[in-house]
Amino acid sequence: MQLLLQLAINGVAIGCLYALVAVGFAIIFGVTRIFHFAHGATYLLAAYAYYAAVSIYRLPALLGLAIAALVAVVFGSCCERFVYRPMLRSESSFLTVFVASFGLFIVVENLVVLVFGSGFSTLESSLSKGLPFGPFELSPVGIIAILGSVGLLIGLELFLARTDAGTALRAMADSAELVQTIGLDRNRCAQIAFAAGSLLAVPAAVLNVNLSGLSPQSGTSMILIAMAATIVGGIGSLYGAALGGVLLGVAENVGIWRLPASWGDGIAFGVLLVFLLLRPSGIVSALRQ
């Protein structure tokens, strides 16, 4: 039983990282209705920017974090400005925009392979070492992941509720046509959504590098989990995306109590399949009933 509880605790920590990426994805989709598969590329670029800054150039970790944040926000904003906006202006279909996003992700993944190689990279860090937590063990990365994720999500809620930009994002998520009618700039709202969503991927990328290393395939795994968490939580709900991320993290880790570790993604998508069959509207909708 102690092992099971330990796995659940580890799952909550990992799930908080999933939650951040999922909420970022949900913000972008909710405001712009763009299925931003290249959000996985944002995560990947942030992870490798931090890894290069700290491991290769030996810069301080905080400076590496700032560089990763800059890379993520610039990339996300450029996706909106130079890829999606021209396509939407020409009234491209949802599927066409998705294929463009998927293609952009593949290009970035291959560029990462070209620059850093296709192997698995690790970062020497004391943050990944376990610390006693009563009868359990939790790494500093896990503690930071849980507390940091809660803090960031509270900050996001305050931003959306108490700032003009946040109000504009919520209005555009409800009705893009209404936003244009009352004189708000839809393009500016989209830029803010992409910047905010991209920024949320950064802490997850940085902490995951310290916790388990990275490879060029890390972005694929993370975006698939983020998409699954968004669907499990309920499309259109930021709270749902966060809850879905935590649920998938716990399910993955508890599942390996009896199954091989390689089954992690399979367990996550098994949970997704169950929700699609039994509760397609997601967790939040179920809780409201």
Image (spheres, rainbow, N blue to C red):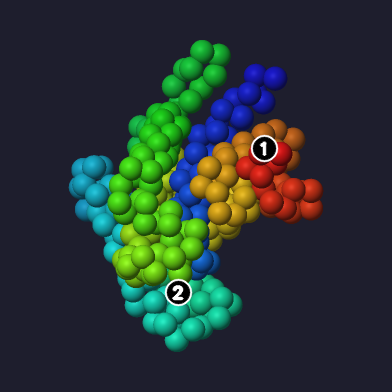
Secondary structure found at label 2: helix
Assess disc 2: are there few (<14), some (14-19) or many (≥20) residues with their C-alpha within 10 Å of its C-alpha: some
Residue 28 in the image: x percent, y percent?
Answer: 45, 60
* Point 43% across, 57% down: residue: 171
Task: Note whether 18 is above or below 45 in the view shown.
Answer: above
Which one is in front, 285 or 256? 285
Residue 7 in the image: x percent, y percent?
Answer: 61, 30
Secondary structure found at label 1: helix
- Mark 2 — residue? 104
Task: Note whether 156 is above or below 172 in the view shown.
Answer: above
Is residue 266 something one can see in this rendering? no
Pointers 1 and 2 in contact (C-beta within 8 Å): no
Which one is in front, 2 or 241? 241
Task: Note whether 144 is above or below 276 in the view shown.
Answer: above
- Mark 1 — residue? 287
If you read the primary sequence from the N terminus, does the residue marked by circle 1 or circle 2 appear first? 2
Which one is in front, 161 or 27? 161
Residue 185 in the image: x percent, y percent?
Answer: 32, 68
The residue type indicated by label 2 comes to: Leu
On the rendered structure, is 187 left or right of 9?
A: left
Residue 243 in the image: x percent, y percent?
Answer: 57, 40
* Point 44% across, 22% down: residue: 131
The residue type indicated by label 1 comes to: Leu
The mark closer to the camera, 1 or 2, is 1
Quadrant location of the C terminus?
top right
Is residue 24 something one can see in this rendering? yes
Q: How far apart are marks 1 and 2 (CA)?
A: 37 Å
Q: Which residue lies furthest to the right in this view?
A: 278
On the rendered structure, is 66 left or right of 254?
A: left
Question: Quadrant location of residue 248?
Answer: top right
